[in-house]
Amino acid sequence: MSLIRFMKHFSLGQQRILFTFALLLLGILYFKFYYHPSHSPSEVIVREIVVEVLGEVRNPGVYLFQNSPTLIEAIERAGGLKETAPFDMDSFSETLETGTLLTIHPSPLPHGEREQGEGPLLKEGMKGIKHEEKKIRISRMASNKLLVFSIPLDLNRVTVEDLCLIPGIGESLAHEILAYRGKRRGFRSVEELKNVKGMGEKKWRAIKSFLFVER
């Protein structure tokens, strides 16, 4: 009753304005505290797995996968081997991460590279897998290709040339980054870039998504 008596003090036009304002206020409160929209399947962002396959395959190139592929799935996507080779299929169950480069070599591997089991891993984290007639080298795609597919570069492996591919990093800053990395014996996090000479907060925010530190 008190609300009705209160409303009688206002004209019909004023009552309509108050009523509209109350509805608007209730709508704002509902959307702020209670409404949680569900995303349709088309709105869900799916990050595809990028794998490059080169060498003794029928269709060398870069291929996209919805899920992390196994070695054999990546080779099959590239059209399979040019020539039949007796592979141990159990060793092809390993899944590949995005940015992987598979290079299928005829035996033997290029001079200076070691097979898995003959010594340490190949330089830059590469490894070789021997399968009688063919050998597979697992490494990383070239930095320019990684950046095209929005795949960040490992801050502890990049070169000056790699860093200069990133917008906002010139040769001078690239040298400073590598000099800092050498003194500290590697980066522990991308945030540590803030300590590099010439690296301001604004520039760091602009480039941080292009880099990562493998843990």
Image (tube, rainbow, N blue to C red):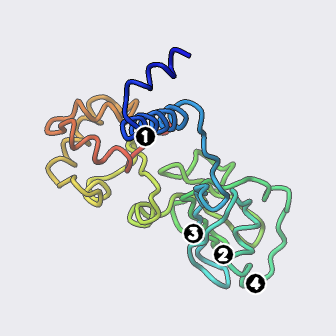
Residue 57 vertical placement versus 155 (above, below): below
Closer to the camera in the image, 38 or 215: 38
Q: Which mark is residue 58?
A: none
At label 1, counting other C-alpha atoms closer than 10 Å, the crowd grade (few under 14, some 14-19, many 20 or more) is few
Secondary element under disc 3, as helix, strand or loop, is strand
Amino acid type assigned to the residue bearing label 3 in the image: Glu
State the separation of the CA atoms marked 4 and 3: 19 Å
- Between disc 2 and disc 4, whose residue precedes? 4
The residue that mark 2 highlights is 106
Horizontal side of 21 relative to 113 (left or right) equals: left
- Between disc 3 and disc 1, whose residue precedes? 1
Q: Nearer the viewer, mark 1 or mark 2?
A: 1
State the separation of the CA atoms marked 2 and 3: 18 Å
Closer to the camera in the image, 136 or 7: 7
Place of residue 82 in the rendered image (x, y in percent of width and height, measured from the top left): 71, 84
At label 3, counting other C-alpha atoms closer than 10 Å, the crowd grade (few under 14, some 14-19, many 20 or more) is many
Kindly indicate whether the residue at mark 4 contacts the one at mark 2 (C-beta within 8 angstroms). Answer: no
Q: Which mark is residue 52?
A: 3
State the separation of the CA atoms marked 1 and 2: 83 Å
Place of residue 91 in the rendered image (x, y in percent of width and height, measured from the top left): 80, 56
Amino acid type assigned to the residue bearing label 2 in the image: Pro
The residue that mark 1 highlights is 16
The residue that mark 4 highlights is 83
Secondary element under disc 4, as helix, strand or loop, is loop
Amino acid type assigned to the residue bearing label 4 in the image: Glu
At label 2, counting other C-alpha atoms closer than 10 Å, the crowd grade (few under 14, some 14-19, many 20 or more) is some
x 62%, y 53%: residue: 97
Secondary element under disc 1, as helix, strand or loop, is helix
Place of residue 35 in the rendered image (x, y in percent of width and height, measured from the top left): 59, 38
Residue 109 vertical placement versus 44 (above, below): below
Amino acid type assigned to the residue bearing label 1 in the image: Arg
